[in-house]
Image: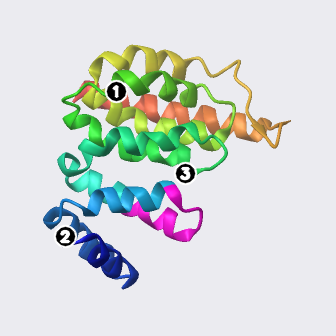
Amino acid sequence: MGLERIYFELKKREDDEYYIELAQKDVLFIPVITDIMLNNTNSISVWAQMLLEKISEINPLIVYPYIGYISEIIDRKTIFNSWSVWKIITNLLVCDYQNYWDNLKSKYYDSLKSERIAEFSIACECACKIISAKPEEEKLITEILKNMDNRNFYINENLSPKSSEVAKNKAQEVLAVLSQSKEN
């Protein structure tokens, strides 16, 4: 299928399952949807990101070759998408045959140490998958999550005690899941 046909298919706005199947059949689909995610600022970009997240969860091997391209969005600190792309990346770590994680982990830890509750929350959501794929990261992730007492969180540069409470609860949830998985 050519590029024009892929764009035509995307304009049809079919169910996600249709596009997931298309991604598995056509090698050009992933770079096209990634390009849409990176270079659009409207709802289609968000849709492309959610679709890519689903595809990366179902079949990470077809998305992994584009991890470098996908990770470019992380440096765009001004948009929420730059934080949410961690969900795609953590899905890809199960097949990280090029050890691309080494290029990204300092940025992940910056997100896990962030004072913005949304960024921190997404980093927490990704912690278990990261540890599952990269067990050597468990110690540092758990240390950061255990050390929540002196952390402050801000909304629009204003201290938010409620956000700090939410963050502590989020960290405790992740630590509980990790503890439970160790027991099993």
Tell whether 86 sits left or right of 62: right
Which secondary structure, mark 1?
helix
Give the amino acid type for the residue marked by disc 3 in the picture.
Asn
Q: Are marks 3 and 1 in contact (CB under 8 Å)?
A: no
Disc on the earlier residue, 3 or 1: 3
Instruction: Identify the main secondary structure in magenta.
Output: helix
Disc on the earlier residue, 2 or 3: 2
**Whole-percent x, y for residue 118 in the image:** 62, 44
**Span highlighted in magenta in the image:** 39-51
Residue at x 26%, y 49% (from the top left corner): 63
Q: Residues within 10 Å of mark 3 (few under 14, many from 20)?
A: some
Residue at x 36%, y 38% (from the top left corner): 68
**Whole-percent x, y for residue 22 in the image:** 21, 70
**Whole-percent x, y for residue 152 in the image:** 74, 27
- Residue 81 - label: 3
User: Which one is nearer the viewer's eye here, 122 or 102?
Assistant: 102
Distance from label 3 to label 1 (Cα)?
A: 19 Å
Give the amino acid type for the residue marked by disc 1 in the picture.
Trp
Distance from label 1 to label 2 (Cα)?
A: 27 Å
Queried whether the magenta region covers residue 46, the answer comes back as: yes
Residue at x 60%, y 50% (from the top left corner): 80
Q: Which residue is mark 1?
A: 101
User: Which one is nearer the viewer's eye here, 43 or 113?
Assistant: 43
Q: Which residue is mark 2?
A: 21
Tell whether 176 sits left or right of 160: left
